[in-house]
Image (cartoon, grey):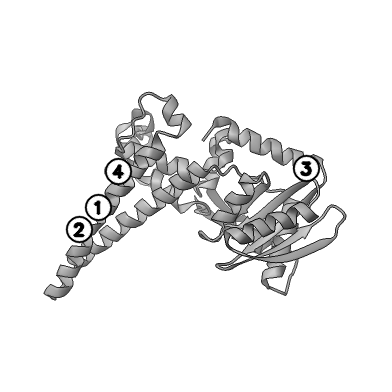
């Protein structure tokens, strides 16, 4: 991820704010794309397209014919169904924002909307882009491949741990145990394939090529670095540590109301669970072995009860 990617995304967002633009909201499903276009003159046009390459080309033709000037596209993050259309529109030169579905739901509730259809959801997304101006993201294909690879590796590791837990659960059926063992033996082969693919992608990441100490050998720290590169958004290159912590759900959440309600602050956990999972063990290791992160003796005295009598 280039350092200038986030700055360019912010610059393009400012360009949208300064000039009149059309806003396209897309409601993504497995087979269909429901699109609503809010034009500069306030008129609204809608269309339905197949969630295939042919449908993407029809959608681009729809935008070229009806969308004048800059077109800001918004769609919800709905699993993998919207990845290809978002990447297609980004490579076609449109501003694309992948939005948290919780934001769209809260925005619709704030307007007291009572109807929920695919077309109305697309209209809400388009209006959200018009009023809230979400930052467009930079979605290079290599980053998408790295993200898919890291998530696939995580799924394989989880499956292998599940099979190990089943073996250790005290199963008495020899047939079932043999089936679990056979499945467990096949998982390392898939992991080896992921490691080879990781090496080819790792050497194509500019930040890793520029650093001579970064080799394609996937050590533990490189898996963590790859996880961060895959899950952090494009604007993270120019964001502050507090913004990144909030994106990962690590910012504290306060609950204070009046003079009687003062609940203790806790982590909000309203953010990327994959980022928090990737940072957990490095944080534990840093707290134990990295001197600047180690707790000092004075920290114990600030606790409610000291660790010694």
Work out how far the residue at label 3 is from the one at label 2, CA to CA, in angstroms: 55 Å
Location of residue 306 in the rendering, given as x and y in whole percent from the top left corner: 33, 43
Asked whether the residues under the numbered discs 4 and 1 touch, taking CB atoms below 8 Å apart as contact, a structural biologist would say no
Placement of 137 over or under 11, stated as above or below = below
Residue corresponding to mark 3: 17
- Labels 4, 1: front one: 1
Residue corresponding to mark 2: 185
- Labels 3, 2: front one: 2
Horizontal arrangement in the rendering, residue 47 relative to residue 103 (left or right): right
Residue corresponding to mark 4: 307
> Considering the numbered disc 1 on the image, is that residue within a helix, a strand or a loop?
helix
Q: Nearer the viewer, residue 99 or 292?
A: 99
Residue corresponding to mark 1: 189
Work out how far the residue at label 4 is from the one at label 1, CA to CA, in angstroms: 47 Å
Placement of 74 over or under 118, stated as above or below = above
Q: Residue visible at 78% across and 51% down?
A: 22
Asked whether the residues under the numbered discs 1 and 3 touch, taking CB atoms below 8 Å apart as contact, a structural biologist would say no
Q: Residue visible at 66% across and 60% down?
A: 26
């Amino acid at each position: 991820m280039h350092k200038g990617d986030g700055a360019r995304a912010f610059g393009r967002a400012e360009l949208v704010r300064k000039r009149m633009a059309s806003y396209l909201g897309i409601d993504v499903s497995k087979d269909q794309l429901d699109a609503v276009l809010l034009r500069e003159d306030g008129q609204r046009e809608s269309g339905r397209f197949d969630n295939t390459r042919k449908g993407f080309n029809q959608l681009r033709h729809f935008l070229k014919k009806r969308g004048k000037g800059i077109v800001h596209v918004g769609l919800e993050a709905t699993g993998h169904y919207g990845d290809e259309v978002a990447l297609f529109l980004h490579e076609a030169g449109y501003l694309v924002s992948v939005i948290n579905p919780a934001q769209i739901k809260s925005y619709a509730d704030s307007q007291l909307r009572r109807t929920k259809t695919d077309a109305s959801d697309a209209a809400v997304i388009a209006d959200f882009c018009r009023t809230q101006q979400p930052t467009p993201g930079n979605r290079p294909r290599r980053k998408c491949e790295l993200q898919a690879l890291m998530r696939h590796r995580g799924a394989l590791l989880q499956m292998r741990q599940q099979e190990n837990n089943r073996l250790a659960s005290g199963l008495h059926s020899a047939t079932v145990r043999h089936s679990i063992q056979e499945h467990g033996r096949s998982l390392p082969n898939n992991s080896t394939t992921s490691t080879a693919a990781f090496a080819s992608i790792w050497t194509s990441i500019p930040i890793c090529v520029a650093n001579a100490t970064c080799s394609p050998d996937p050590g533990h720290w490189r898996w963590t670095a790859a996880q961060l590169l895959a899950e952090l958004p494009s604007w993270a290159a120019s964001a502050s540590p507090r913004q990144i912590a909030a994106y990962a759900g690590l910012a504290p959440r306060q609950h204070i109301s009046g003079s009687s309600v003062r609940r203790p602050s806790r982590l909000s956990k309203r953010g990327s669970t994959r980022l928090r999972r990737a940072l957990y063990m490095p944080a534990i290791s840093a707290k134990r072995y990295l001197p600047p992160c180690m707790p000092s003796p004075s920290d114990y005295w600030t606790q409610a009860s000291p660790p010694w009598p």
